Amino acid sequence: MLDELRGKLPGWVAASRLHASEGRVASYIPELAKAPGAALGITVLGRSGESVSAGDTELLFTMQSISKVFTLLLALMDNGEEGVFAKVGMEPTGDDFNSMLKLELVEPGKPFNPLINAGAIAISSLIHGSTPAAKTERVLAFFSEAAGGASLAVNEEVYRSESATAHRNRSLAYFLKDNEVLGEDIDVEDVLSVYFRHCAVEITCGQLARMALVLALGGADPASGRQLVPRRYVQIAKAFMLMCGMYNASGEFAIKVGIPAKSGVSGGILAVVPGRYGIGVIGPALGDKGNSTAGVHLLETMSRSLAWSMF
Ligand code: DON
């Protein structure tokens, strides 16, 4: 299967790259605006370790919202389902990823799901560790293990750039504090520092594909077969990815591509072909729903040609 892909992938990447011009690089985090808008890269990694890559796979980028899938898994391992779902719901919102609307409209002010910003901030507060630095260390260790033993690190410039301009996320977090989703003993700035840092973890397409492959294999490490994450928690994460991993384009993505995926504002996409492949994509130019225009086009092409839809 990957042999078939090897021949076709460079042509598909070249065709999808043209769609980068339909998007724009995110600039609300000033440091992200430096990314090359015309870039597109992809790695597809199979269960026996074979991989196919094409395009700008040497690019380093920050995980941004893609990290939320893995902090959710860590929070589930730390607190169990009951502990996590006491703080976040199980439903898509239909609103923007940084929206505040439903926190006030719907009682009891709990974020609808762990992939919107409010939900991911609540999830950051659930990660065990005695200090924000200790929590971040645990996040990095878990992400690095899922990425196949890479030493993933925080891009401190991106972290500082986001922290200095994150007025909206700060408002969301203080709102959560007022709603008691963040309890009395929780310091809002401490939680935000963990959240901004996990969003700023720097990665390549290949490492992202490796993280995706762990999800494709139901939480098992592709090399050792060891269960890194309980299968049940990976089911929860993949259900959220399908429902709201591509924000307000998740329905369209489920119809056109039909696999669980998660995007980030840096233009990364992590996608999972269950039981078969982990995929990492980078294409920094984003469409109006916040997803990589070239990256989504490429995944659509591949899914149609290779019959990847789960449905
Ligand atoms: O909180 C933020 O706004 C960013 N750190 C992450 C947002 C994000 O990636 C949304 N993605 N489409």
Image (cartoon, rainbow, N blue to C red):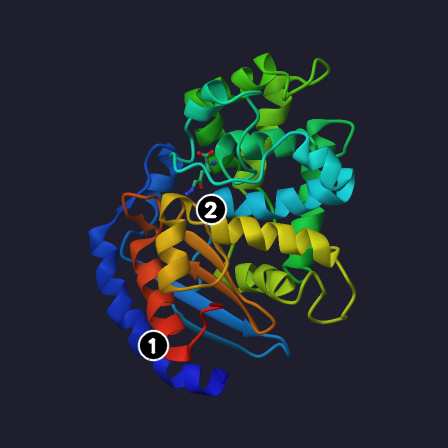
Residue 272: in sight, yes or no?
A: yes
Element at label 1? helix
Where does ligand 1 appear, by image quarter?
Answer: top left
Neighbor class of circle 2 (other Cα within 10 Å; few <14, some 14-19, many 20+) is many
**Residue 65 versus residue 301 in the image, above or below:** above
Q: Amino acid at mark 2?
A: Cys
Neighbor class of circle 1 (other Cα within 10 Å; few <14, some 14-19, many 20+) is some
Q: Which residue is mark 1?
A: 10
Residue 127: in sight, yes or no?
A: no
Direction from residue 125 to residue 41 in the image, left or right: left
Q: Which residue is mark 2?
A: 244
Q: Position of residue 213 (x, y in %)?
A: 60, 65
* Viewer-side residue, 117 vs 57: 117
Q: Earlier in the sequence, mark 1 or mark 2?
A: 1
Direction from residue 107 to residue 263 in the image, left or right: left
Residue at left offset 43%, top offset 61%: 281
Q: Position of residue 263 (x, y in %)?
A: 44, 50
